[in-house]
Amino acid sequence: MQTVLFPVFFMLFLGYLARKKEWITTQQNEGGKKIVFNILFPILVFHVLAQSELKKEFLIQILFLFFAWSFVFLVGKAMTSFTGKRFSNISPYLLLTCEGGNVALPLYISLVGAAHAVNIVTFDVAGILINFGLVPILVTKQSSSELNWKSLLKKIFTSSFILAVLIGILFNVTGIYSYLMNSTFQDIYLSTIDIVLKPITGIILFTLGYELKLNRAMLQPLWRLSLLRLLTCSGIIGTFFLFFPNLMKEEFFSIAVFLYFMCPTGFPVPLQIQALVKDEEEEHFMSAFISVFLMIALAVYTIITLVWK
């Protein structure tokens, strides 16, 4: 367990120290995030979808979660009087999705092994559709009086994440990936993927630590929004027992559900809602909120590890 937890806290601390000591600028930190989200992470999505065994429940779970997250957003909008007016322009978006690829997935794999990674990836595909499909529409509508559907749809379907999902599924169902793995290109592909994916988690944690900054004015909206996210995500977990009772009887699947929905907001969300961010304090609020749930995810991971193993 320590081999997973210590590196996480170390990278967070290193990012925090880099800001305090001014080793790198805010612009350089933003550049690191863009490298991960625009280039490296879509490759991870493609790779996992291409190699996973896609079960018949795959599409059903994605549709279920798409509607569940949409409902959560409406709840967030309705509860801004509770969570606070100061950050009401961004707070409903921070309730959306969970970070699978860089938090839930590595923690889950350390528990049950890579063979069951598709459980997390299925949830994350729904998150990708929310983050790169629904969120751009909502942000554009909120920040602009006119909605240009043509340019918006072009932006969505040329997004590296959406392309990664589509191409990954295509490689899977057509057998192209299987052919690749049985050819002379297997070792080249796997070594390339390995070197591409290794930096992702470290850079993400570093940038989170860099932006981790709290002030007293944030504390009340922070704990209130955290409470609302805990309640809504717990509600999603509960509905899995209602709609997928047989799957929830499977140990590895139920572990995926409990771990995934206690993870922080999907890391692409802050980038996707930049048009709504008014000042640096809102940037710090988003980072602090994600960091709170990173700690919650690690606590849940620790509990599952102690109980299950």
Image: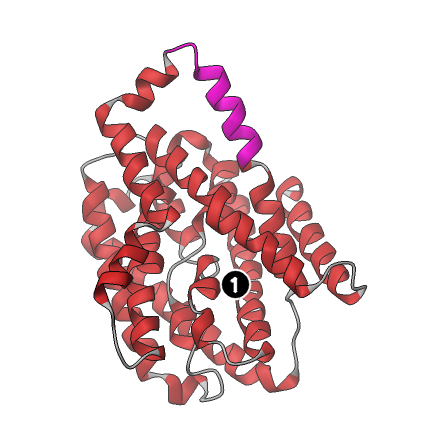
Name the residue at 44% across, 83% down. 83
**Residue segment shown in magenta:** 183-196
Q: Residue furthest top?
A: 184
Q: Residue furthest right?
A: 21
The quarter of the displayed image where residue 71 is located: bottom left
Name the residue at 48% across, 44% down. 39
Most common secondary structure along the magenta stretch: helix
Give the percent coordinates (x, y) of residue 116: 38, 34
Q: Residue flagged by tag 1: what amino acid is it?
A: Phe
Q: Is residue 7 left or right of residue 175?
A: right
The residue closer to the viewer here, 23 or 82, is 23
The residue closer to the viewer here, 71 or 89, is 89
Instruction: Please tell me whether mark 1 sits on a helix, a strand or a loop.
Output: helix
**Depicted 8 relative to depicted 229: above or below:** above
Query: Would residue 303 be visible to someone looking at this image?
Result: no
The residue wearing badge 1 is: 293
Give the percent coordinates (x, y) of residue 195: 57, 31
